[in-house]
Amino acid sequence: MKMIVVFEKAPRLRHIGHLDLMRAMQRALRRSGLPLCYSQGFNPHILLSFAAPLSVGMPGQREIMEVPIARDMTADEFMQKLSSALPPDLPCLECRPADDRHPAPMALLTAAMYEAQLETVPDGLEEKISAFLAQEEIPAIRKTKTGLKPCDIRPMIYDLSLRGSVLRFTLALCEKATCKPDLLLSSLFEFAGMARPRALVTRTQLLGERDGAFVPLETL
């Protein structure tokens, strides 16, 4: 059995890296007294996996991890024990049990929703967004493990809109195609011919697909 856990990484912890986040979760799980599953070998560790790492500097409102457990238990019991061991800025929001055969959240992940709180909003940005999205191709340079590579990010941008001083967008996030928020913002403001304002980017939701439509990943 395993638990699919939804948690928040609050803005105050945004500079905590992924490995530090994993260590914090492992410590909290050990303190919780939950019946956890451990790896085999000389240095056993908790079998814990995340749907997608968060970039340093980015909060996450509904992050997802998978925790295998050694015996059946209710979601309420699991959540109560885990919540008692977590710090206030890393709360457990909800969880649900799943069979061991259920696909890992990472395997079901296809996209993510983001919000970028802009420090300033350049005049005419909304009109530039419409023209930006009207392009058939949006060439960009993406960093990969083997170096810098040109790519077309237009198929990876599912929506982009401006509401007040907040840019909201949905981007591809899977093994086949990923567009990072920084690449989108750089491409947008370069196209618009505007200085890129400072912004706090938050990942608000991880998404999977059901019947050809995006749904919250935790519901799959």
Image (cartoon, rainbow, N blue to C red):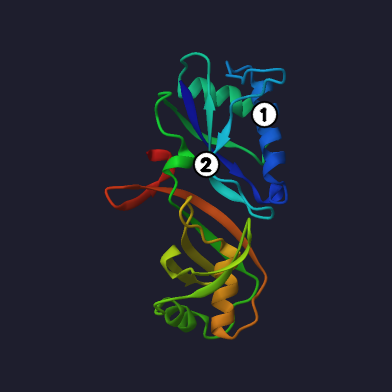
Q: Eyeballing the image, is 171 above or below 135? A: above
The answer for how far apart the CA atoms under marks 2 and 1 are is: 16 Å
Q: Is residue 33 left or right of residue 96?
A: right
Disc 1 is placed on an element classified as helix
Q: Is residue 210 visible?
A: yes
User: Which label was assigned to residue 154?
Assistant: none
Q: Residue at x 61, y 84 (%)?
A: 194
User: Could you tell me residue 150's position as x and y percent?
Assistant: 55, 70
Q: Amino acid at mark 1?
A: Gln
Report crowding for label 2: few under 14, some 14 to 19, many 20 or more residues within 10 A (C-alpha): some
Q: Which residue is mark 1?
A: 26
Q: What is the count of numbered marks?
A: 2
Q: Is residue 157 visible?
A: no
Q: Residue at x 52, y 72 (%)?
A: 164
Report crowding for label 1: few under 14, some 14 to 19, many 20 or more residues within 10 A (C-alpha): some
Q: Amino acid at mark 2?
A: Ala
Disc 2 is placed on an element classified as loop
User: Could you tell me residue 55's position as x and y percent?
Assistant: 64, 53
Q: Which residue is mark 2?
A: 51
